[in-house]
């Protein structure tokens, strides 16, 4: 192997490399993990918002009425429903869980406050997300999806 | 680079044609292609000996296990 | 194989003589765990505390020792750079495997050497050392490793063709400092950017021709 012995070449490369990150490969596997985690968080969060929306519509409540029923601040609910980066408080999530009669820890995962390593849980959440449309009127199919998902959350 | 040893390789016409075709497609010499093939063979052997399986996957993500004898 | 190469000592800005070798052993992997990892972790914690999440090295939990079984597989070649009796960089190449084919249209299907893993000692990474209030020690380690990859490609009759998957954080090094050609995102590999050299580009990198 004949390496370049020109000091000018070396200095030029050093200047270009300065301030750069170089590592690949090891990074790749780490990024795969990170991306899976973040995708999981995004999916779960979308499912949480869908669940909230469908529950509200199932009970034919406005956001204001829903917030009163839950005993949760209205701005908190609107924040959850409209802002992906909004982090709900554990109290709010617990209140929602009580209203739905589902274990609070399951909703902690869905809301992004905790992380799941359970494949079945993720698959059930995905199925629910795929079957529900948060903006349209609650169809019978959505009604079934909501019932099935709440049942799944309660059973496990 | 490690020291190299030379050997004579006898191939049939068909094998030689294949070697020429593959080395042209990969844009490497016939020697380089055979060395790559040998390494690939070793890689497969090592992974199979660890209990791993070798699969081919088609576009529909259907997998077929390749049995190496 | 052992080669005398030069790297840059940041303290003086001048070249110093180091050694690039291919007889990488498990001891070298253990050395990275003992010498490199604690510094990477410390820097990651500092950056996290400051909220500079984008600068956190995503290889902080990478463990070279898991690569030990691959040392005796001929499809893999490992290179290390040593200076002052310390490992300054480590790289793993594949000369055979699923990523050893070119994707650039003008050389699609041609054989290439795949740069599977590269890591530079944390004390040589400026963004990392700044977070610890220290200066990076040596420079051009990454360039020397890429140079070794290109020379290996030539030895293997791949004419300097190499390819790799880059993270967003390392794209500027491979695309700008090494002037590799970005080919596109690879859905099979977390949408990472695939870059490769043609023989001409590899030669330009080796000689410094613009």
Image (cartoon, coloured by chain):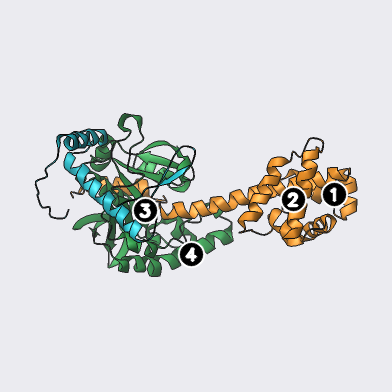
Chain colours: A orange, B cyan, C green
2 and 1 marks on the same chain: yes
Q: For mark 3, what is the residue?
A: C117
For label 1, the residue is A74
* Residue C61 shown left or right of residue C26 in the figure: right
SS under mark 3: strand
Residue A149 is tagged as 2
Identify which residue, C51 or A104, lies in the foreground.
Answer: A104
| Distance from Cα at disc 3 to Cα at disc 2 | 43 Å
Kindly identify the residue that appears in the image at 60 percent across and 48 percent down.
A39
Query: Tag 1, which chain?
Result: A
Indicate the position of residue C166 as horizontal and vertical percent values: 42, 45
- Which residue is identified by label 4? C41
Subunit of label 3:
C
Whole-number angstrom distance, CA of label 2 to CA of label 1: 25 Å
Q: Nearer the viewer, mark 2 or mark 1?
A: 2
Asked which quadrant contains residue C59, the reply is bottom left
């Amino acid at each position: 192997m004949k390496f370049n012995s020109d000091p000018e070449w070396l200095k030029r490369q050093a200047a270009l490399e300065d301030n750069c990150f170089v590592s690949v490969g090891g990074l790749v596997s780490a990024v795969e993990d990170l991306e899976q985690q973040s995708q999981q968080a995004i999916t779960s969060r979308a499912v949480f918002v869908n669940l909230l929306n469908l529950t509200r519509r199932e009970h034919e409540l406005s956001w204001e009425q829903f917030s009163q029923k839950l005993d949760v601040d209205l701005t908190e609910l609107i924040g959850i429903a409209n802002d992906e980066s909004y982090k709900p408080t554990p109290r709010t999530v617990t209140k929602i869980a009580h209203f739905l009669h589902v274990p609070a820890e399951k909703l902690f995962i869905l809301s992004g406050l905790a992380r799941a390593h359970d494949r079945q849980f993720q698959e059930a959440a995905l199925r629910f997300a795929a079957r529900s449309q948060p903006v349209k009127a609650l169809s019978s199919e959505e009604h079934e999806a909501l019932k099935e998902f709440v049942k799944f959350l309660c059973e496990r | 680079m490690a020291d190299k040893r030379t050997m004579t390789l006898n191939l049939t016409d068909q094998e030689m044609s294949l070697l020429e075709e593959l080395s042209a497609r990969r844009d490497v010499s016939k020697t380089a292609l055979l060395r790559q093939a040998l390494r690939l063979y070793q890689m497969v052997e090592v992974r199979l000996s660890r209990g791993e399986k070798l699969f081919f996957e088609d576009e529909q993500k259907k997998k077929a296990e390749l049995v190496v004898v | 194989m052992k080669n005398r190469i030069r790297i840059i000592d940041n303290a003086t800005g001048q070249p110093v003589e180091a050694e690039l070798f291919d007889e990488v052993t498990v001891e070298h992997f253990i050395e990275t765990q003992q010498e490199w990892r604690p510094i990477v972790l410390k820097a990651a914690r500092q950056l996290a505390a400051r909220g500079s999440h984008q600068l956190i090295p995503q290889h902080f939990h990478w463990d070279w020792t898991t690569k030990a079984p691959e040392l005796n597989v001929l499809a893999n070649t490992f290179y290390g750079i040593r200076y002052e009796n310390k490992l300054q960089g480590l790289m793993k190449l594949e000369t055979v495997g699923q990523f050893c084919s070119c994707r650039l249209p003008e050389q699609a299907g041609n054989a290439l050497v795949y740069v599977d893993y590269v890591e530079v000692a944390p004390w040589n990474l400026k963004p990392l050392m700044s977070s610890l209030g220290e200066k990076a020690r040596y420079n051009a380690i990454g360039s020397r490793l890429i140079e070794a990859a290109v020379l290996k490609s030539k030895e293997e009759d791949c004419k300097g063709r190499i390819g790799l998957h880059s993270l967003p954080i390392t794209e500027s090094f491979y695309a700008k400092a090494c002037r590799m050609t970005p080919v596109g995102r690879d859905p099979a590999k977390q949408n990472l950017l695939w870059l490769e050299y043609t023989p001409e580009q590899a030669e330009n990198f080796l000689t410094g021709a613009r």
